[in-house]
């Protein structure tokens, strides 16, 4: 087996390295950060393994609300228009996926991937510690209309084994007593018994140890990829900082930075970064055991060990990825307002912001490119960890096929 470079040490890159190493390949992982999952979306994500909450981002309801988002009338969602040709192209394709038919098709396609990923996460949980929990999830809905609409999608997901249950407000309180302290009203919820949670950053750090010890995987950190080098439509190497690294096979799994690096090889990808925020605070006695997703406020609450992770907001527009104090304060105020007794918000609070690499149909891009030897495993949006084991396995199979 020849050497394969894996570009990116987030959760997608790390699981890709694992899947390839298991097949006997010599693997080297390269990342600009000092260690795995230390900078991008894998560091501060919502901590949920949402195998059955795989709803595509483009939907009829989101499309209908775009004017409100542009005008800043929804604090959880912000759209700032840009004349970037890439953004315009992505936006048109995104709106093309916002029909009910496309939404259901994309959602179920992602659901199938998530179900393929679930056994792999469970298997690795026996080898890698990451505050893994199987406490299920309750998705809350503010009004009867949104709850009934979700109930229809619930029936579709139950065909795939979701075993989701529609809950009244009273049943939700019985299922998760911590909701008695919820600071806002909700009509009811959807109980997903098979959804899980954990710390993806810890997962990646401990997976690194496993990869080094059991598979001899090498890592090059503090090494920023600048360019993919090709000759006659074949991969010949990558440029990282001042280093020229020769290779004939590589996988790009750089999250939101995948598209600009792929462009250096003449490959255009329909990925646009959507910025999100999170905070991690000490969990209090009234923190929920089950994960909670508030659909109206686009906010998730997830216990990881003795900490509480709150994540949310979706900012679409010009790319910079800079931390905005005003947007973080919006998330913090939302957390304090709707779950005031869940976390110690005046204690040691760790803020984070990151870019989620979103495709128009919310489905990841996995497979070979027009450049011989160059592969992609990218575009997972906010479901990178949930889908990671499935897409890594798929990529490893495709690499094996192309090598034959």
Image (tube, rainbow, N blue to C red):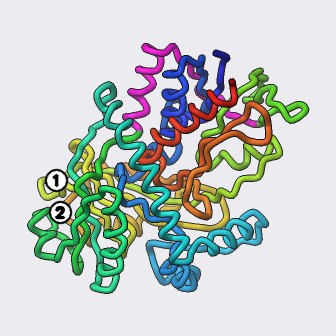
Q: Nearer the viewer, residue 272 or 269?
A: 269
- The residue pinned by badge 2 equals 341
Residue appearing at x 73%, y 29% in the figure: 240
Q: Which mark is residue 156?
A: none
Left or right of 180, for residue 280: right
Mark 1 touches mark 2? (CB < 8 Å): yes
Identify which residue, 7 or 248, lies in the foreground.
Answer: 248
Picture coordinates of residue 132, whole percent (x, y):
27, 39
Whether 275 is drawn above or below 37: the answer is: below
- Can residue 32 be seen? no
Instruction: Write down the quadrant of residue 169 in the picture.
Output: bottom left
Q: Using a 10 Å C-alpha cutoff, classify the residue at mark 2 as few (fewer than 14 neighbours), some (14 to 19) or many (20 or more).
A: many
Q: Residue at x 10, y 63 (%)?
A: 177
Q: Where residue 151 sits: x, y (%)?
A: 30, 75
Residue under circle 1?
284
Position in image of residue 238 (x %, y %): 76, 29
**How much space separates mark 1 and mark 2, taking CA atoms?**
7 Å
User: Left or right: where does residue 375 sit relative to residue 60?
Assistant: right
Quarter of image, res 202: top left
Q: Position of residue 396 (x, y in %)?
A: 57, 31
Towards the viewer: 125 or 35: 125
Magenta residues (range): 201-226
Mark 1, secondary structure of its residue: loop
Q: In the rendered view of the protein, which quadrant contains the N terminus?
A: top right
In the rendered view, would you say 296 is above or below 137?
below
Q: Is residue 316 visible?
A: yes
The quadrant the C terminus occupies is: top right
């Amino acid at each position: 087996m020849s050497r394969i470079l894996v570009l990116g040490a987030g959760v997608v890159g790390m699981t890709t390295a694992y899947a390839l190493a298991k097949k006997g390949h010599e693997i080297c992982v390269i990342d600009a950060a000092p260690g795995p999952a230390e900078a991008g979306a894998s560091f501060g994500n919502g901590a949920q393994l949402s195998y059955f909450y795989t709803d595509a981002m483009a939907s009829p309801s989101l499309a209908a609300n775009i004017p409100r988002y542009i005008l800043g009338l929804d604090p959880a969602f912000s759209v700032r228009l840009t004349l970037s040709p890439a953004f315009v192209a992505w936006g048109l394709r995104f709106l093309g996926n916002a029909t009910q038919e496309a939404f259901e098709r994309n959602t179920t396609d992602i659901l199938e991937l998530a179900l393929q990923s679930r056994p792999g996460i469970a298997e690795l949980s026996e080898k890698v510690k990451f505050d893994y929990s199987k406490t299920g999830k309750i998705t809350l809905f503010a009004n009867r209309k949104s709850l009934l609409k979700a109930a229809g999608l619930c029936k579709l997901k139950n065909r795939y084994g979701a075993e989701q249950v529609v809950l009244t407000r009273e049943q939700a309180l019985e299922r998760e007593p911590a909701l008695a302290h919820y600071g806002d009203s909700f009509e009811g919820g959807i109980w997903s018994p098979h959804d899980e949670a954990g710390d993806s950053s810890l997962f990646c750090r401990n997976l690194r140890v496993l990869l080094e010890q059991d598979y001899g995987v090498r890592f090059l950190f503090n090494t920023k990829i600048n360019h993919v080098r090709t000759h006659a439509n074949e991969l010949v190497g990558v440029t990282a900082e001042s280093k020229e690294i020769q290779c004939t096979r590589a996988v790009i799994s750089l999250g939101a930075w995948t598209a600009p690096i792929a462009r250096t090889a003449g490959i255009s990808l329909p990925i646009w970064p959507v910025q999100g925020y999170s905070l991690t605070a000490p969990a209090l006695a009234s923190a929920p055991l089950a994960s909670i997703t508030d659909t109206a406020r686009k906010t998730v609450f997830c216990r990881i060990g003795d900490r509480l992770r709150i994540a949310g907001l979706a900012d679409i527009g010009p790319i910079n990825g800079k931390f905005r104090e005003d947007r973080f304060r919006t998330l913090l105020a939302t957390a304090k307002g709707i779950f005031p007794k869940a976390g110690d918000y005046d204690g040691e609070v760790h803020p984070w912001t990151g870019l989620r690499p979103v495709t128009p149909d919310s489905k990841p891009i996995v497979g070979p490119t027009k450049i011989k030897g160059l592969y992609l495993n990218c575009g997972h949006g906010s479901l990178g960890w949930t889908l990671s084991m499935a897409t890594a396995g798929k990529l490893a199979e495709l690499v094996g096929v192309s090598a034959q």
